[in-house]
Amino acid sequence: MPHAEVTVTLPPAVWIGAVSREYPEATFRVLSAVPREEDGFGLVEVRTETPDAVLEWMREAPGLTAVEAIRRDPEGLVVQFETTEPLLLASVQASGVPLSLPVEIRDGRAHLELTASRDRIAALGEAFDDLGVTYSLDRLYESVEAAAPLTEKQREVLLEALERGYYDTPRTTTLSDLADELGMANSTLSEILHRAEEAVVKSFVADRLDTDLDVAPPDS
């Protein structure tokens, strides 16, 4: 399944774009957000050295109809809000792309991580274009890990093998060296890698053929 990382430049008229520009050193993390027909509501975590100033700004913002600090800690606060301008949420919802939360926003820029078909990701871009929202597609790749039925052990070993050059051409480490590093027998490592590779390859091919393959059940 394609995975995309997108940076959206929020319009100044959108409250969270405006407040994040007013306090560029602050980090805003949207923890939950629910768009409704005419408005939206949610929770945003604010990491800043001036939480009271940010909270006061939000209470005065014309796009916000309700603002309440529901938690404070030494690094900032969590705010529950209601807004009449759920622009970003409406765009994502209209394209049918599941939005991965939290969404981090700094200095007027929102960083989105999305997993959806290429057609739906393209539809999101079109929705942003229609609204005049500037965005950049920072990365687009196949998220094999999310689709592959790997155990935590398989995932850990596979990533370790990748990082140490086991899958480089030519290889920069051997099975024996990798087994020594991981503290396991060669036969055990070979079996774990084989099962992990089988799961990843079959899941990768099935995604493209839009069919189901008989993937062996995960093993440790």
Image: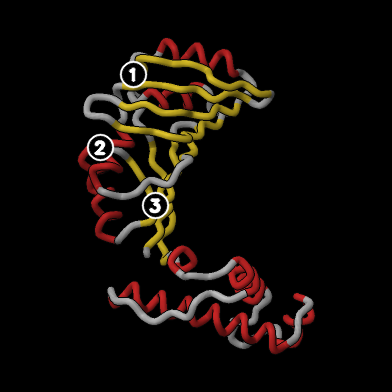
Q: State which quarter of the image contains the C terminus.
A: bottom right
Quote the CA–CA distance across marks 3 and 1.
26 Å
Residue drawn at (60%, 81%), measured in percent from left and top? Answer: 193
Report the residue at 57% width, 85% height from top.
194
Q: CA distance from mark 2 to mark 1?
A: 19 Å
Residue 175: image location, x then y, percent: 70, 87
Residue named by callout 2: 132
| Quarter of image, res 128 | top left
Residue that badge 3 annotates: 114
Relative height, residue 148 to residue 215 (above, below)? above
Locate residue 87, reporting x and y percent: 30, 32
**In terms of sequence position, does the residue under pointer 2 or pointer 1 come before the other?**
1
User: For residue 59, what is the image quadrant?
Assistant: top left
Q: Is residue 125 visible?
A: no
Q: Is residue 199 something that shows in the picture?
A: yes
**Is residue 36 depicted above or below 205 in this figure?**
above
- Front residue of this view, candidates 86 and 212: 212
User: Which three-letter amino acid code belongs to the residue tagged 3?
Assistant: Leu
Q: Nearer the viewer, mark 2 or mark 1?
A: 1
For image coordinates 29% across by 77% down, the residue present is 209
Q: Earlier in the sequence, mark 3 or mark 1?
A: 1
The mark tally for this picture is: 3
- Tell me if 49 is positioned left or right of 121 in this view: right
Disc 1 crowd, CA 10 A, few/some/many (<14, 14-19, 20+)? some
Residue 63: mark in rendering: 1
Q: Secondary structure at mark 3?
A: strand
Rendered location of residue 64, percent (x, y): 36, 17
Instruction: Identify the image's colour scheme: rainbow, by chain, secondary structure or one colour.
Output: secondary structure
Residue plotted at (59% across, 18% down)? 51
